[in-house]
Image: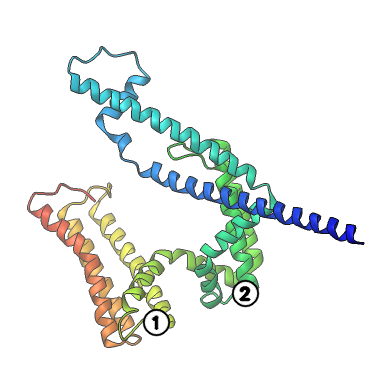
């Protein structure tokens, strides 16, 4: 009996050590994935590849060798650019290897579950909105979030590294994944709730803006309530779509074919439409917001117009070309 007890104790200890090692491995792999995500972002925004010396080196790498420059500074710049290209290539090779490793790890049920749990935490606000704004049950909201995460996981397997366009096969597969995702969403939600979900996605920009506005008011004596925030999101979305339609009508009537070239009168018209839109938003929200809240809203809307007004002023002074 005593020997059996000791044996069972060793078995339990071995299981505990094995579980501890697996947990340590899991944490290490998750840290590698986080590092990958950060490196991917950094490689997207790195400005160093756009320097003249780097561009010159990239061109020379695919052409006949150019004569060695006589100027020592230019030679040093080219050497620095070549070193930068090599560093970027090494980073991309490393990221590709880590990405492949992550794909292999995702086949493990325990690791996949840990990633699912991580993304569920990231989607916590979306889940809460799905219940409160769209009227989903907690079970429907959980399933909706899982569908979003699964779609994201499938998409990640197809996407390459920054600067690497999708091939035709990947485009076709991505289209299939998205279509299948929408079918599952509609099956889960039904037509009415599916339309609410579509609205929720379309108003993402306005929701982010209102979220910042709520944060601004959170330290005041008149914080923005949930129903007020929802009403403001709707007002912003509706009025800005109207502004866009009205500017499209103006552009068509004016014969504007290149929207990337903005003349002073075009910018002035957009500013006028934006101010009209802001006034309508003010009028719609005047019955829902307190006086202090309304003043803060007006200040936010006015600040949104300021960059366009500054651009128009510079353009009229000849300091700014016809640009967006």
Q: Find disc 2 in the rendering and name its residue.
A: 138
Q: Residue drawn 75% across and 56% down?
A: 13
Q: What is the x, y in percent for residue 258?
A: 27, 47
Q: Is residue 60 visible?
A: yes
Q: Find disc 1 in the rendering and name its residue.
A: 228
Specify whether 67 is left or right of 122.
left
Residue nearest the observer in this picture, 137 or 6: 6
How many labels, in total? 2
Judged from this view, the residue extending furthest toward the left is: 317
Q: Residue drawn 64% across and 42% down?
A: 104
User: Where on the picture, by quarter, is residue 307?
Assistant: bottom left
Q: Residue drawn 55% across and 70% down?
A: 127
Camera-nearest label, 1 or 2: 2
Task: Decide: is 34 above or below 125.
Answer: above
User: Where on the picture, by quarter, is residue 49?
Assistant: top left
Is the residue under label 2 in contact with that under label 1 (CB below 8 Å)?
A: no
Q: What is the x, y in percent for residue 263?
A: 17, 52
User: Where on the picture, by quarter, is residue 204?
Assistant: bottom left
Residue nearest the observer in this picture, 73 or 164: 73
Task: Decide: is 64 above or below 316.
Answer: above
């Amino acid at each position: 009996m005593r020997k059996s007890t000791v044996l069972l104790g060793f078995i339990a200890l071995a299981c505990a050590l094995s579980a501890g090692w697996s947990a340590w491995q899991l944490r290490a792999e998750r840290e590698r994935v986080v590092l990958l995500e950060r490196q991917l972002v950094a490689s997207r925004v790195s400005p160093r590849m756009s320097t003249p010396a780097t561009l010159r080196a990239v061109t020379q790498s695919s052409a006949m060798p150019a004569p060695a420059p006589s100027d020592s500074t230019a030679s040093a710049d080219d050497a620095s650019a070549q070193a930068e290209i090599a560093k970027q290539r090494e980073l991309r090779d490393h990221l590709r290897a880590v990405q492949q490793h992550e794909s292999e790890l995702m086949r493990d049920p325990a690791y996949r579950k840990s990633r699912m749990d991580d993304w569920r935490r990231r989607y916590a606000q979306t889940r809460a909105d799905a219940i409160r704004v769209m009227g989903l049950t907690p079970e429907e909201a959980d399933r909706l979030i899982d569908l979003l995460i699964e779609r994201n996981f499938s998409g990640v397997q197809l996407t390459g590294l920054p600067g690497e366009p999708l091939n035709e096969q990947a485009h076709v597969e991505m289209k299939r994944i998205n279509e299948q995702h929408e079918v599952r969403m509609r099956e889960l939600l039904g037509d009415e709730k599916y339309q609410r979900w579509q609205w929720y996605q379309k108003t993402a920009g306005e929701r982010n803006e209102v979220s910042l506005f709520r944060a601004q008011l959170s330290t005041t004596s008149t914080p923005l309530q949930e129903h007020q925030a929802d009403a403001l999101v709707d007002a912003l979305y509706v009025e800005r779509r109207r502004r866009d339609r009205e500017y499209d009508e103006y552009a068509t009537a004016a014969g504007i074919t290149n929207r990337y070239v903005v003349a002073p009168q075009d910018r002035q018209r957009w500013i006028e439409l934006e101010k009209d839109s802001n006034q309508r938003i003010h009028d719609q929200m005047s019955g829902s917001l307190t006086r202090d809240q309304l003043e803060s809203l007006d200040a936010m809307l006015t600040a949104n117009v300021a960059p366009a007004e500054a651009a128009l002023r510079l353009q009229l002074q000849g300091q700014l070309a016809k640009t967006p």
